[in-house]
Image (cartoon, rainbow, N blue to C red):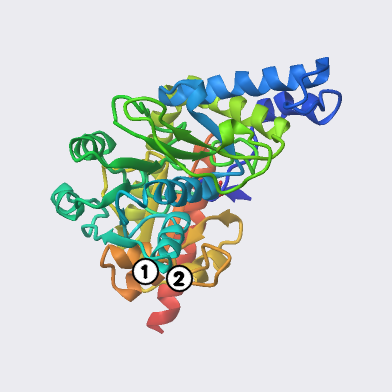
Amino acid sequence: MIYLDYNATSPLDPRVLDAMLPYFREKFGNAASRHHELGCDAAKSVEAARERVARLIGADPREIVWTSGATESDNLAIKGVAAASAAKGRHLVTVATEHRAVLDACEHLESKGFRVSYLKVNSDGTLDLDRLAKAVAEETVLVSIMHANNETGVLHPLREIGALCKERKVLFHTDATQSFGKEPIDVQAMGIDLLSASAHKICGPKGIGVLYVRRRAPRVRCEPLLHGGGHEKGYRSGTLNVPAIVGMGAAAEIAGREMAAEQPRFRSLRDRLERELASRLEGVEVNGHPERRLANTSNLSFRGMDGEELMKAVPEVAVSSSSACTSALLQPSYVLGALGCDAERVRGSVRFSLGRFTTGEEIDRAVDGIAAAVGARRKAARR
Ligand SMILES: *Cc1c(COP(=O)(O)O)cnc(C)c1O
């Protein structure tokens, strides 16, 4: 199996697993029970992990709230800020290509009487900041714009968006799940007030994530989704998942240390994949901006080919197709539709996303398999 679906989830790094194992065995303490050594140890490990996550984004550890993953973080940020600021205004701004966790949370708010503006993107997936500036109104309480898109890898300019939000005195949330640990992020320099991230996209465990919530200049007000015990400064009650938290801390530390070396390696493998496919096949198009995107992501459309069919023809290559279900709901992707791609191009799209354990030899084998399958399909169609 050649795994090229890192944007969906990633394999656990063995170093992360090693860091977690003692917390499943002898170090089983509850981080909120600090009357004995086991609880104290757990609490200390949780705080060490919090520091590691904070360091990766230039935050203060006290601004990091543990959640069950980025879906929860997005919900907490959007619904929590909306609930806390409803007296000030009931309008939010987001983008049509956001992850479902953001879009569905916004749609829920619409059913509660909030107004949401969904900004359109250009045909390369990028956003016009003029459009954002026009959409922000007097009653806007939150702008939620992702850093990197999960399907195309397209990056939005957080620094410029943050500056615009600051100028208009609107809180800025970013879903940075795909860029966390892959791209440099600095919540200060970028003017970010809330940020969502998840461990399982960076070779950490599933079911653990964080929401960064700014404490100063301004102090963000955000209502909790869960009540009961007041853990995490009241933002998120519930006994902490200590092994997963330790795992996310380890994954963040490794990603921070290896990012500078991993980025060019991903880029060179990704470019090799695109170059080789384009040299062997006609009608291969890149979806999304060719430069302004994550180094590990390649969303390609193969003319006259169905993405799902292609995945079936090359079962040894694990990728995603926009035509296949990307969530628990059986719906085709809306992201390429928002870029204005025609139905054929959406149907023919395949997302390749590589990561830490991808090798050049795997890329070459994937190219061989895909080129052969597309070639055979086109030959059959001509007959
Ligand atoms: C994967 C992903 C999510 C959801 O994260 P979970 O931790 O799986 O809930 C949210 N946003 C983006 C951009 C993602 O890629």
Q: Which residue is mark 1?
A: 346
Total labels: the figure holds: 2
Label 2: which secondary element? loop
Label 1: which secondary element? helix
Mark 1 residue type = Val
Q: Are marks 2 and 1 in contact (CB under 8 Å)?
A: yes
Residue 363 in the image, given as x and y percentages of width and height: 49, 44
Q: Which residue is mark 2?
A: 332
- Front position in the image: 115 or 337: 115
* Residue at (58, 42) in percent of width and height: 10
Q: Residue 204 bears which disc, if any? A: none
Q: Residues within 10 Å of mark 1 (few under 14, many from 20)?
A: many
Q: Is residue 29 above or below residue 11?
A: above
Q: Residues within 10 Å of mark 2 (few under 14, many from 20)?
A: some
- Direction from residue 116 to residue 239 in the image, left or right: right
Q: Can residue 319 be seen in the rendering of this structure?
A: yes
Residue 324 in the image, given as x and y percentages of width and height: 50, 68
Residue 273 in the image, given as x and y percentages of width and height: 41, 47
Q: Is residue 329 above or below residue 120?
A: below
- Front position in the image: 304 or 175: 175
Q: Can residue 253 be seen in the rendering of this structure?
A: no
Residue furthest to the front in view is 87
Point out the image quarter for the C terminus: bottom left
Residue furthest to the right in view is 26
Q: Earlier in the sequence, mark 2 or mark 1?
A: 2
